[in-house]
Amino acid sequence: MKKVVITISLLLLWAQVSNAQVSFMGRVWGPKSPDLAEEVPPNTGISPNYFGGPDNGQPPGVATFPNVRGFASLDGPNNETIATRTWEQAPRGWYWMSGPEGKYTLMFTGPSHGLGPAVFIRPIIFTNNYVKDGVTLDRKVVPNFDFGVFHNNGWDEKPAHAYYQPFTAKGTSITNIGFKPVHDGVDGADGGSQTILVSVHEAGSGTPDTWKQIGPTGTVLEVDCGGPKDYEWTVAWDSGEIPTVPGKKYAVCLRAEKSEGKFQMYMRKEVNNDDGCYRAGGLGTTGWTKHDLWMGVSGDSDGLYVPYNKKIQKEFRDFAGSSTKWSQTYVAQGNSLAGVILYAATSGVQPSMNRQRLTVRVREDGTEGKVVGVEKLAIGHGLYTGDASWGTFGVVYSPDEVKLTPGKTYAIEFETAETPYSLDGYVNIKNMVNDKKPGFNPYKKVAPDTYAKGTSYKDGTQKMDFDLDMQIVEYANHVPDWDQALDAENLIMNGDMESGQLGSHAWSFLHIDKSNNDIIFGKGRDLADHSKNQFFTVSSREFNSKIDGGYIQKVEGLSRMDNYVLSGKMRCSFSTDWDHATCVGYDLTGQTTDPNASTIVWKAMSGAHSVWNTYTSGPIRPEKDSISIWLRGKGTSKEGITFRSDFDEFSLQRMKTEVPGM
């Protein structure tokens, strides 16, 4: 049997003009440890106790991630990104964004946010989010870790100089590590702090303190915790700087920069009968502890690269200088751009940067090269005091909107999208009137973070001796027509109409005109088809009979977080007109009792009769967890013809929301 080939563009099927809104909401959370993974609720939609229960609906085995930056962009050029940041207070890890309907790409990422909870998660991207007016998606975002233990209910009773936490790599390099000391080893709740160095070591013979280090050492500045300062800390690298082999064992080393330095870590008893972490020096015993550290380790195993990362947790340190345009050159590793975040501030006589935008364009071979791909508008999102505003500008792309060549140099160019018109009328908290001079002021990378393969440019031409504080994310793989990518699994039972007896195996008879007994349900086989392919048919018993009926199936176990595509083949023995129609329909409510319900979306066959016509729906999203499929043949004429409708090779497939190649 030949597979149905989808050739029609889903984007064209989706396009329409509307002024209504869609919204994205949910939580960024994950299991406190792998053995508690089953306690993370699935994406089943908004639950009645979403804001109720202990810790506002947070299950006991779940760790929440506040201060995660979220961005959502519509496909296409010149669309304004929308932004969010997950909450620090209850409900911790909650986010919300809203915008016009359309096809979105979402990104959640973790460059740190000042003093307080440090966000160390890798970027998480969801593609192909087709959302119609009035729809709210409450997606639970679960980060992927090579190692992830986030328990606060125990700690090392004595400080150590260094800790080594073994883990097994999932990907080809480590890009993000987060950890949580219970005490900084200096003066706790007071103002003192120390630098913690972080490195990754390849497993070998002997204890971890003798294992070979791979890649550069990361630096965590001014670690200050203890008492009420219950902070997490983070460090990062560019993709490829710390190469790993999937399935191989490594260890993360945390050590005080000074030889006499010491600190204490949160940890919990190891549950898999492993040795746990290895501690060295300080006031305790050197050796294996049978405990795992509070730590998150993640890397390149998710179809994304981070070729330009924010490596130092500190932010908002040194300004690059105010201008209307800034650029940063870098070397691509992936096949297309996924997202960009720039740390910046805006003038005190301008509106909050949450209302300001930057046009982002990508140039090949440097700042004066040709623009590649689409231009988009990054939205500002940050803190605002009424006369000062600082934070990030962010934008996210769908696969192949900006195609890249690995190993080639590109310039990410930021130019203010504001004008005297868009700034006019703003007065800040000090009654200072705006100067109608658009511009923004990026921050420099925080030392010792540098990027050796590129540099920044002011006004697109003036080369500087520093790099901009930002993050660049890329898609590692190229898959053609990703906006139409579907899972291979057909969710319709007996969708090929080959199995079982008629009227069983998930399909039921649809007899709309029950007063008419002349309708015939059956299986057909083309006379010239020697492949023994079977199909469903519905026809009139005699040439002068009316018919109205067909087949129906309810497909259950779906997710309202996902879109699906319905496809199949239809054929009829007479042209579609006022009296004859061969139709396919779907009902997003999943109901199967009322063929005249307004919730059924019907599509009549078009094209030539007596030959097979291919049908493909646009993206469809169930209201809850099911969709009903309706196949219908209707003939109301008695003009001397036996009317017949045939159906074959129907499938319902989930649209991929992952990144390409995953």
Image (tube, helix red, strand yellow):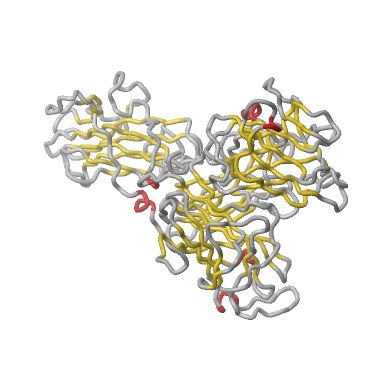
Residue 3 drawn above or below residue 312: above
Residue at x 80% of width, y 33% of height: 155
Residue at x 74% of width, y 24% of height: 290
Count of numbered badges drawn on the protein: 0
Residue 58 drawn above or below residue 236: above
Residue 532 drawn above or below residue 325: above
Q: Position of residue 128 (x, y in %)?
A: 45, 47
Res 428 quadrant in image: bottom right
Query: Quick check: can you spot residue 140?
Result: no
Q: Position of residue 132 (x, y in %)?
A: 46, 51
109 or 79, which is in the foreground? 109
Query: Quick check: can you spot residue 455?
Result: yes
109 or 369, which is in the foreground? 369
Residue at x 17% of width, y 41% of height: 609
Q: Position of residue 400 (x, y in %)?
A: 41, 52
Q: Quadrant of the N terminus?
A: top left
